[in-house]
Image (cartoon, helix red, strand yellow):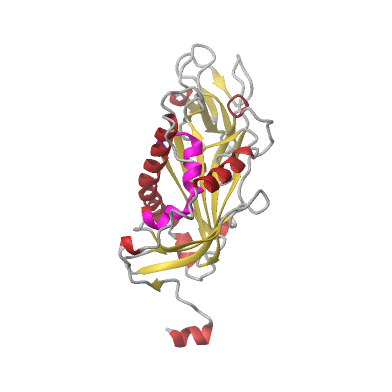
Amino acid sequence: MSDRADRTGWTPPLRRRRRPHWAAQTPTWREARPALIADALERASARPSGNWFVVGASRDVRAGDRPYGRTVGGVEIVLWRSDTGGLHAGPGACPHLGAPLRDSRLVCGTLVCHWHGLALDGEPVAGWDPYPAHDDGVLLWVRLDAVGGEDPSDRPVVPVRPLSGRAVDAVFTAVGRCEPQDVIANRLDPWHGSWFHPYSFADLTVVRAPRDEEDDAFVVDVSFRVTNRLVVPVRVEFTAPEPRTVVMHITEGEGATSVVETHATPLTGEAAEQPRTAVIEAVIATSDRRGFALARAVAPVLRPLMRRTAGRLWRDDLAYAERRRALRSTGRFPG
């Protein structure tokens, strides 16, 4: 293998690591200062979102398919596509007598209420007014000015991604009993990775933590586990471009320029006693290796595996976020 590397410049994507005992890791609790994480969360919360919310994957809504329903901030919405693929969104209750439009039918790209036949083509009619919607090629966004309460923007804050034709993407969704800030705070604490997820991460070191608005990225060296002894070492940066999004960019190592976007969308309104938040996570993977063309070709097979990996992590991380929210609600959260 070394001779091949010397001749061609090829390097193997995997490294062999002996799996250390979990308790033998270097403790990270001193570095993971509550005030530092809180400051990063506060800076993220102050950034404008333009009132845009991620509501699902682009593949969730297809031309000719049934409508797609979602509740955001306590507001019921419906999305569908015209016959030409144009995305439409608006209130999820029919303005006539309140029928759930997510259960209605699409006829030649027009949404027809199944109670009394009111036809919606995406334009205002009979008291029904559309919401601005955006399809970025991976995720769907809807602008809800009454929920966001900010100055609206024409487009959402979409992170920099690999070129779509050179990447494989998968979107995972889960729901937790917490608020968006609890999900974002989880992602702004990289120190918990190898302790809380030893099955996925090893050799995790936070190289640099944020200092201020101008230097606001977590830089982390980490090895992703493929098997018990084989890992992929990379350098990543965590940033929060808007209040409900944290992006992990791979900046060095295998899959450089790949990203993982974690979006936290509130399902309930601010006054809800039991808040619920949807975690919508997009993994957009790429590689310069020749063999990655095969990965793109078999993307439909890979996507369930990618979602399963994300689901395993979020099974634990939602417990983290829910615990944080429970402590906050009783005034017992540290820091």
Of all residues shown, which one is farthest toward the top?
A: 97
Q: Residue at x 40, y 67 (%)?
A: 231
Q: Residue at x 61, y 25 (%)?
A: 130
Give left or right: position of 304 versus 285: left
| Helix, strand or loop for the magenta stretch, by majority | helix
- Range drawn in magenta: 175-195
Quadrant (top left, top right, bottom left, bottom right) of the N terminus:
bottom left
Q: Is residue 62 visible?
A: no
Give residue 299's quadrant in the image. Answer: bottom left
In the rendered image, residue 139, in percent from the top left (x then y), is placed at 54, 43
Q: Residue at x 41, y 73 (%)?
A: 15
Give whichever of 178, 142 is nearer the camera. 178
Q: Is residue 165 above or below residue 55?
A: below
Give left or right: position of 211 versus 220: right
In the rendered image, residue 285, in percent from the top left (x then y), is placed at 50, 58
Confirm whether the magenta stretch covers residue 266. Answer: no
Q: Is residue 275 above or below residue 244?
A: above
Confirm whether the magenta stretch covers residue 184. Answer: yes
